[in-house]
Structure formats: structure tokens, C-alpha cells
Amino acid sequence: MISLQNQIILITGASSGIGAACARIFAGAGAKLILAARRWERLQELANNLKEEFGVEIYLLHLDVRDRSAVEYAIANLPPGWSDIDILINNAGLSRGLDKLYEGDIQGWEEMIDTNISGLLYLSRYVVPGMVKRDRGHIVNLGSIAGHQTYPGGNVYCATKAAVRAISEGLKQDLLGTRVRVTSIDPGMVETEFSNVRFYGDHKRSDKVYQGLTPLTGDDVADVIFFCVTRSPHVNINELILMPVDQASATLVHRQS
Ligand code: NDP
Ligand code: 8X3
């Protein structure tokens, strides 16, 4: 197992859910964390807690991954000692709505495409060259079961996650001959702020998504990511699907009534 002590790990979307859980597990392993998101207070609170609990070094980035020049600037201007990123976790992402495509909210589509696809591409474009130069590194992309199976109303969100899947596969091919690794983590239902964001803050609707079943938690996903990035350097886990025991496919879920 590879030690993560003092490795520099950049996590996008670290202010909640899976990203925050990743920050915690990697802090526990002694990594140096670069945490990025738009909600600055959330990032600060998380960083303060992790510094106090684990004594780790943390650098915060107030970053909207959709802003290409902001991403370029942030990566080019990391402080001394922070620029040699070992692991990039492209986690920032969201879904908006569950409408039929022909009735869909176009602004919501753009948010998903710009965040889930363009944002992930920008981070990869500005971080991966350094990894190639150093001949070491690992990119972990958050895909989804939605990238494997399209479900009713999922249309554009599913398309963005299918794109993430293709991007991970393509990047793996392009990195052949280097020691840089690529992993796509593709979860089913994880109880985070995800559904609340999908339904624009309608808690009644988002709570229903997880009613009567035991969903995955952010910690469950972080645990699997931790496993993937700590394998021996010659091992690449290309793609990993995980889902709750109560889920069998994107749409087939067992609920207790
Ligand atoms: P959360 O809503 O809890 O977290 C999403 C994170 O993404 C937040 O930290 C948010 O931070 C960040 N984010 C969103 N938009 C931007 C942006 N434009 N720039 C920077 N950061 C952004 O959801 P999850 O933790 O569940 O989601 C994490 C990833 O996992 C997503 O890619 C999602 O698609 C994927 N996923 C989730 C599943 C689930 O069931 N929950 C299942 C499969 C995959 P902030 O708002 O502060 O910017
Ligand atoms: C998140 C899981 O099934 O809501 O990607 O699309 S799902």
C-alpha cells in the first residue's frame, strides 16, 4: 500500500458530501490538501476542523470550476511547495432537475455541462501536464452509475456522466507510457446534498429519494477512493461501480414500506 504522507491532493467540491469525506480520510493519512469549492465559509470550517484533528497542512481555493481562466490562474499560482500535485480528485459536480428533455430547464443543462464536463476538463488540462513531467500522479474522476445507465428524466445529467466515463477512458489511453494513473469512481445512490441541489432546495422531495433504504454515505465513497489511490504504483483501477445493497441498477431500488 502506498503511503499518502505529505502527498499533495487536490479535491474539487470539497465543501460537502463526497469531497468533504475525501478531505477527512486523506487528512487522516497525513496528506497535504488543496481544497476547492465556491462556499468559502464551508471550506474554512472544514479546514479548521481537519487541521485541529489531524495537524495537516491545508491550502484553500475559492474556485468555480466552470471558470476556465480562474482554474488556470489558481493552478499556475499555487504557493511554493504546493504545485506538485500528486492526486487530483475531480469531484465537483451537480444535477439539476429531473424533467423530460423536451421540457427541461436549459440553464440547468448548462450548469451541469459546464461543471461536470468542462470544469473537470479544465482541472485536468492544467494539472495533468505537471504529473506527466514528474512521471507520477493519479487522477480520480467522479462518474456515476448514471454514466452507465440512463434513467427517465436523467437525460442531460446522465449524458455528462457518460462524458466523464469517456474522458477517463481517453485520458488513460493518452497517459499510456507514463506512470500517471486514472480512475473513474461510479457510485449509485449516495446521501449527500446532491438530491437537494437537484431539486433546488426542495427538502421534502430530496428526502424521499433515500426513504426506506440505506444509501451509501460520502464516507463509503471516500473509503473506496482511498483504496484505489493507495494500490501499488503498477496497479490502475480503471473504473469502479459501487452502490448500496438496496440498489441493483440506476432505477431498481428496494425500499422498506
Ligand atoms: P454535494 O452536492 O454534496 O457536493 C457537490 C460538491 O461540488 C460541493 O462541494 C459543491 O461545492 C461542488 N461544486 C458544485 N458546483 C461547483 C462549481 N461550479 N465549482 C466548484 N465546486 C462546485 O454532492 P456529492 O458529494 O454527492 O457529489 C460529488 C460528486 O459525486 C458529483 O460529481 C456527483 O455528480 C457525483 N455523484 C454523486 C452521487 C450521489 O448519489 N450523491 C452518485 C454518483 C456520483 P460549492 O457549492 O461550495 O461550490
Ligand atoms: C448520482 C446518482 O442515480 O441519482 O449520480 O444519478 S443518480
Image: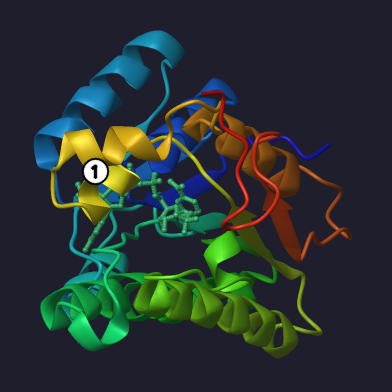
Residue pictured at 33% horizontal, 43% vertical: 14
Position of residue 195 relative to residue 127, above or below, is above
Residue pictured at 14% horizontal, 52% vertical: 200
* Residue 227 as seen in the image, left or right of residue 91: right
Local secondary structure at mark 1: helix
Q: Would you identify the image quadrant in which residue 184 lies?
A: bottom right
Front-most of residues 228 and 29 = 228
State whether label 1 is within 8 Å of ligand 1: yes
**Disc 1 residue crowd, few under 14, some 14–19, many 20+, Cα 10 Å:** some
Residue pictured at 79% horizontal, 59% vertical: 237
Front-most of residues 75 and 154 = 154
Q: Whole-percent x and y of residue 186? A: 61, 58
* Residue extending farthest front: 257
* Residue 222 as seen in the image, left or right of residue 240: left
Q: Would you identify the image quadrant in which residue 145 lies?
A: bottom right
Front-most of residues 248 and 2 = 248
* Residue 177 as seen in the image, left or right of residue 162: right
Position of residue 69 relative to residue 250, above or below, is below
Position of residue 116 relative to residue 245, above or below, is below
> Mark 1 — residue?
196
